[in-house]
Image (spheres, grey):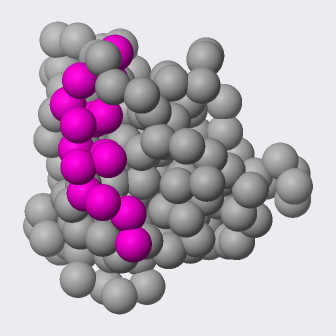
Amino acid sequence: MDDRQEKLQWLKHALLETGLKASPFAEKAGVAPATLTKFLKTPDNITPPSNRIMKALAEAHDLTGYGYDGQAPETGFNEEGSHPLSPSDVGEEEYERLKQFIGNSESDTPGSENFHVIEGNGLENLHIKHGDIVFIDHNRLPKENDIVCLSLRDEENFTAKTIFRLYVPSGSVTACITATNDPAISNKVIFVDGINVKIYGVVEKIVRNL
């Protein structure tokens, strides 16, 4: 990826992560808004912002990059991980009943790896609560506003966990967000890089935890 594309991708990620439009994003760093708006609108015809400007943007918003080594905002790796459904969650009889009920899907084959129990409140505004059971279609490609199953890998601590998020792609940027008022995890964007963060399927059916 050349310098122009690197800067374009960084700016797209930064705008999505901060939730700002280009003008207020630039103004907070003391940068003329046109410097960003013109580049974002016609990146192939406009000279990219200098590294000095990119560093000023990174510093103003506490985002790593271009010579600024501050800590990027948390991405949700510290929240609870959801877990595969097991008979111990619902009992043997209910477990078999669920497999039969949910297994009527035309697009996937029922099995224990398709069921997950939601942990946490990351999707509470979509009426998906802690303890709800979801059925995942591993063969479906996600579309905008689908609920997706994400695998998060933390190589530093040799751990991995599964969470569920709302899929909100923007151009070439693949991102997922929470749908919650919980201040601990609201407004946190997770970028899917296919290495440390992967999509492992789309939620097809939900069974409420009553």
Asked whether residue 204 is drawn in magenta, I would say: no
Residue 31 visible to an observer of this rendering: yes
Indicate the quadrant where residue 6 lies. top right
Question: Of residues 61 and 53, which is closer to you in this image?
Answer: 53
Task: Name the residue at 15% across, 41% down.
Answer: 145
Question: Of residues 144 and 63, which is closer to you in this image?
Answer: 63
Task: Name the residue at 25% across, 57% down.
Answer: 33
Task: Name the residue at 18% across, 20% down.
Answer: 105
Q: Predominant secondary structure in magenta? A: helix
Question: Of residues 185 and 98, which is closer to you in this image?
Answer: 185
User: Magenta residues, as a range?
Assistant: 30-44
Q: Position of residue 166 (x, y in %)?
A: 26, 49
**Figure check: 193 above or below 35:** above
Q: Position of residue 82 (x, y in %)?
A: 50, 58
Q: Position of residue 150 (x, y in %)?
A: 47, 42
Question: Of residues 12 and 121, which is closer to you in this image?
Answer: 12
Is residue 66 toward the left or the right of residue 47 in the image? right
Image quarter where the C terminus lies is bottom left
Asked whether residue 43 is drawn in magenta, I would say: yes
**Figure check: 54 above or below 182:** above
Point out the residue furthest to the bottom here: 183
Is residue 69 toward the left or the right of residue 2 in the image? right
Q: Position of residue 195 (x, y in %)?
A: 66, 30
Is residue 66 toward the left or the right of residue 137 in the image? right
**Figure check: 75 above or below 169:** below
